[in-house]
Image (spheres, rainbow, N blue to C red):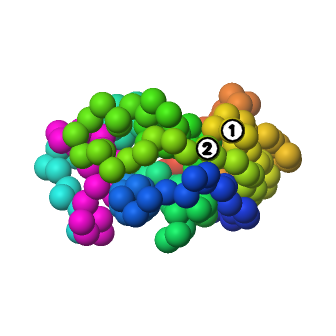
């Protein structure tokens, strides 16, 4: 089961990303972020033709220190802003912090790695993006001011368990178990 979301807004990048940064971050967002032997910064030339691993556990586990399997933030072609893609908006707040800490802000962690010589690590991110979860009816904002990220709940909505009818309270679970037992008993008659 997936979470369906809608997003509105974008974040400004100042100064704009250069061509190498824009190209890398676009590929980064399109490449599945699984726990690859080559490390967390892998970007594939053709992300839709992923080099799936025979190790299914590893393939379904995000790289160490990454928030999830897909980064939802993608830069515009001009590099002046980044937007949160609605199809992968979960973990948006955590992914934004990751991108700032690793690739965008002064002292970015990727600066110490090979392959990032063209990166400037001098960007400031500002703006707000609104996200609405269709199933949970939760509405929240991801605000970034001078590279400081903050999530703001505007409407709390319901939990994923409630949205999908899998409430986690013991009473409801017991009712379901009792119903299942009655159904099984009636089938035996």
Tag of residue 174: none
Dot 2: what SS? strand
Q: Does 128 appear above or below 4?
A: above
Dot 1: what SS? loop
- Left or right: residue 121 versus residue 76 is left
Would you say residue 33 sits in the magenta stretch? yes
Identify which residue, 1 or 45, lies in the foreground. 45
Q: Residue at image x 24%, y 66%?
A: 45
Q: Residue at image x 85%, y 47%?
A: 155
In percent of width and height, residue 41 lies at 30, 44
| For the residues bearing labels 1 and 2, Cβ distance under 8 angstroms | yes
Disc nearer the start of the sequence (1/2): 2
- Left or right: residue 66 versus residue 132 is left
Label 1 packing within 10 angstroms: few (<14), some (14-19), many (20+): few
- Left or right: residue 92 versus residue 67 is right
Would you say residue 51 sits in the magenta stretch? no
Identify which residue, 167 or 53, lies in the foreground. 53
Highlighted magenta segment, given as a residue range: 29-48
Q: Residue at image x 22%, y 40%?
A: 114
In percent of width and height, residue 113 lies at 26, 35
Q: Residue at image x 66%, y 56%?
A: 12
Q: Which residue is mark 2?
A: 124
Identify which residue, 105 or 63, lies in the foreground. 105
Question: Furthest residue to the left?
Answer: 54
Q: Which residue is mark 1?
A: 146
Disc 1 and disc 2: Cα gap in Å? 6 Å
> For residue 22, which quarter of the picture?
bottom left
Q: Is residue 114 visible?
A: yes
> For residue 81, which quarter of the picture?
bottom right
Q: Is residue 180 visible?
A: no
In percent of width and height, residue 189 lies at 53, 53
């Amino acid at each position: 089961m997936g979470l369906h979301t809608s997003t509105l807004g974008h974040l400004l990048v100042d100064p704009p990303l250069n061509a190498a940064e824009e190209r890398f971050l676009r590929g980064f967002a399109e490449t599945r972020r699984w726990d690859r032997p080559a490390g967390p910064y892998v970007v594939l030339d053709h992300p839709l033709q992923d080099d799936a691993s025979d190790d299914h556990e590893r393939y379904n586990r995000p790289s160490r220190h990454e928030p999830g399997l897909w980064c939802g933030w993608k830069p515009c072609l001009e590099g002046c802003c980044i937007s949160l893609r609605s199809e992968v908006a979960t973990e948006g707040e955590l992914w934004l912090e990751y991108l700032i800490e690793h690739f965008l802000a002064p002292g970015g962690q990727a600066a110490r790695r090979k392959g990032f010589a063209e990166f400037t690590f001098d960007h400031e991110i500002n703006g707000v993006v609104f996200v609405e979860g269709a199933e949970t009816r939760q509405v929240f904002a991801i605000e970034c001011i001078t590279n400081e990220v903050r999530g703001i709940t505007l409407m709390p909505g319901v939990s994923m368990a409630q949205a999908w009818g899998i409430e986690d309270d013991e009473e409801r679970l017991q009712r379901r178990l009792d119903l299942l037992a009655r159904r099984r008993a009636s089938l035996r008659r």
